[in-house]
Amino acid sequence: MFWIVDNGSSHRGKKAADRLRATYPNAVLVHTPIHASWLNQVEIYFSVVQRKVVTPNDFTDLSEVTDRLRAFEDRYNATAQPFQWKFTTSDLDDLLARLDRHTADHPEESSAAKAA
């Protein structure tokens, strides 16, 4: 079983992976990329909902919350536009090369050195 998480402080690094595996031996902790994570996109959406839909929290009952959320969903879906992805495979290659150079220049900061 793969447990996909972002890079939040509560589940970062080897200690978090070890804690999960101790509780669930068949689980593998997988961190999403730091940039452009789909989890970050979900967090952004819920941040928008928090700011534009449920604040201020002055609802009289749950049906009012439901109605406002559904109205927002309809409006958001009607106005949403696809975006052009600009991070290419060449950009990824460049980023990985920079990370490799950085790790070679600073071995004390590498995840392999920290795990040892």
Image: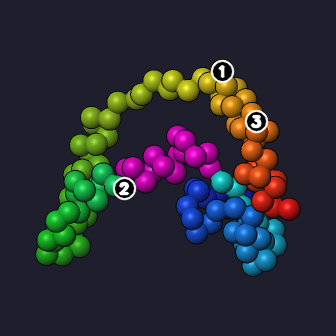
CA separation, marks 3 and 1? 15 Å
Question: Where does the magenta region start and end?
Answer: 32-46
Task: Write down the residue under mark 2.
Answer: 46
Horizontal side of 34 relative to 73 (left or right) equals right
The residue at which mark 1 appears reads as 90
Residue 41 screen position, x and y as percent:
45, 46
- Residue type at the position of mark 2: Phe
Q: Position of residue 88 (x, y in %)?
A: 60, 23
Q: Which badge, 3 or 1, is on the more N-terminal residue? A: 1
Residue at 82% x, 53% y: name it: 112
Q: On screen, 70 above or below 65?
A: above
Question: Around disc 3, counting alpha carbons within 10 Å, would you say few (fewer than 14), some (14 to 19), or many (20 or more)?
Answer: few
Residue 34: percent from the left, percent from the top?
58, 46
Colouring of the image:
rainbow
When asked about the image quadrant of residue 52, the answer is bottom left
Callout 2 secondary element: helix
- Give the numbered dot on residue 100: 3
In this view, 84 is above or below 30? above
Q: Nearer the viewer, residue 79 or 46?
A: 46
The residue located at (58%, 69%) in the rendering is 10
Q: Check disc 3 and give the amino acid type.
A: Asp
Nearer-the-camera pick, 102 or 18: 102
Q: Farthest residue toward the right?
A: 116
Give the secondary structure at mark 3.
Answer: helix
Relative horizontal placement of residue 16, taking residue 84 as reference (left or right) = right
**Residue 16, percent across and down?**
69, 69
> Cβ–Cβ below 8 Å for labels 2 and 1?
no
